[in-house]
Amino acid sequence: MNEYFYKCFNCGKEFSNVLIEKEFHYLCPECGTADKNKPLTGVLEVVYNYDKLKKNISLDKFLKNEPGKFWLYPELWPLEFLANEEIIKGISNEKLERLALNSSSFLKFNFEDYPIIILDETRNPTLSYKDRASIITAIKCIQLGVKEIVAASTGNAGSSLAGICARLEINSHIFVPKNIPDAKRIQIQSFGANIYKVDGSYDDAFDLCLEVSSAKQWYNRNTAYNPLTIEGKKSAAYDIFISSNGSIPDIIFVPVGDGVILSGIYKGFKELLSLGWIEKLPQFIAVQAEGSNALVRYLESGQFEFIPANTIADSISAGAPRNLFMAADAIKHSEGKAISVTDDEIISAQKIVAQNFGILSEPSSAAAMAGYIKLKNSNKISKKDEILLLITGNGLKDTNSLQGWNVSPEGLSYNEWLEKLEVK
């Protein structure tokens, strides 16, 4: 097994991986709390022996890895690998290849004469960034000998877990809020998952999921609650590093709901820094919907206040961001900032991303573009800055917003079209 331990983000206490994993602790055994309508406390972080890793991992060799295949660098994952092989214990090579992410997601564009990079996660196995976390947690579930895994989700994490579990042939249970987009609900059901629609918000689904999983002893994948969700989402930092041949962007725009994508990708770059492979962290810009901006408000006031979320961007709709404190820490230590954008700005950005880059993004993903445009138009972005936007989910997962700016075309007969198009 790889050398790693767990450290509490709040109290700083350290715990062996045997204690945390074998006894199924998710939060810190000393100070962890998961109160309703509040951020989690005692979130755990996986820590490795970076001094030893510096000696054992060659940077040149690392940069030759293919993006999207995390198992090619086994030393950086809290999983069991077979000795001296890039093969995960309990997962056949055939199943492992099913888990590869899109290897060509690092795309360069120009927008209004400004260069930008997009990390396009819309072509992952279940069409979202959430696959990064679902893969790691599902594998850990198998290695722990548990046969059932569960998650609460606004849609993407649930459809991701359902799809990954279908590929790995294990059972999944998904708790969703009543306002889940039909496309995401259908995706979850189509993958064969057990779905539980809660007459309430995502925060209600999250709390119910915790209670049920504890009673039934199902392995819980809930975002931030399970520290491996943060661990899985760090992989984007490595893929960016590999794709750019060892360089990193100056600024990264991240759509933020619960804060786990932000915390995860920040952790990945922090590990690159610990390995001595980069000299500084990129600056992170957290972009939230105006109707779900708890992180923005927390950074301004230093206090958390629960306000029910209300936004078209369902994937970043969270009244109580479960990983609020770690996300805020990522912003502070990267000298970044958190900004809000309106739903109208999000929809406008969704149209821009589709028509300028050929990427169909869901509203939550388009929020990253909306945040970029907002800062660019305020002259807070320079052409010299290397900018990267995370586009985290496919637009086909939530077609309601697309229907708002795509009017259904009229239907004319064969001859009527010839006449209208002036074809003789």
Image (cartoon, rainbow, N blue to C red):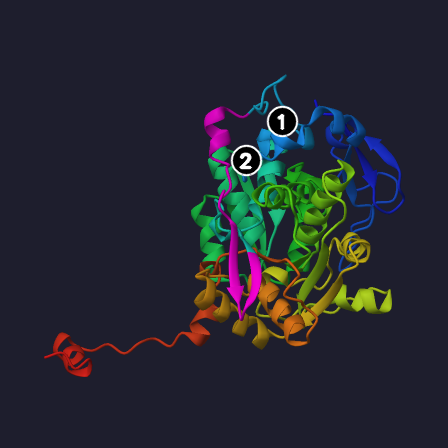
Q: Position of residue 100 (x, y in %)?
A: 50, 37
Residue 143's disc number: 1
Report the residue at 75% width, 29% height from top: 54
The span picked out in magenta is: 91-117
**Marks 1 & 2, CB-CB < 8 Å contact:** no
Q: Nearer the viewer, residue 165 or 5?
A: 5
- Above/below status of 79 relative to 127: above
Q: Quadrant of residue 297?
A: bottom right
Q: Position of residue 365 (x, y in %)?
A: 57, 61
Report the residue at 71% width, 68% height from top: 339
Q: Nearer the viewer, residue 334 or 264?
A: 334
Disc 2 secondary structure class: loop
- Above/below status of 142 relative to 301: above
**If the image is split into quadrants, where does the C terminus sit?**
bottom left
Disc 1 packing (10 Å; few <14; some 14–19; many ≥20): some
Q: Is residue 78 visible?
A: no
Residue 231's disc number: none
| Type of amino acid under label 2 | Lys
Q: Position of residue 318 (x, y in %)?
A: 68, 62
Whether 115 is among the magenta residues is yes
- Above/below status of 380 relative to 39: below
Mark 1 or mark 2, earlier in chain = 2
| Type of amino acid under label 1 | Gln
Disc 1 secondary structure class: helix
Q: Quadrant of residue 358?
A: bottom left
Measure the C-alpha gap from mark 1 to mark 2. Answer: 19 Å
Whether 311 is among the magenta residues is no
- Residue corresponding to mark 2: 69
Q: Position of residue 148 (x, y in %)?
A: 58, 36
Report the residue at 53% width, 67% height from top: 111
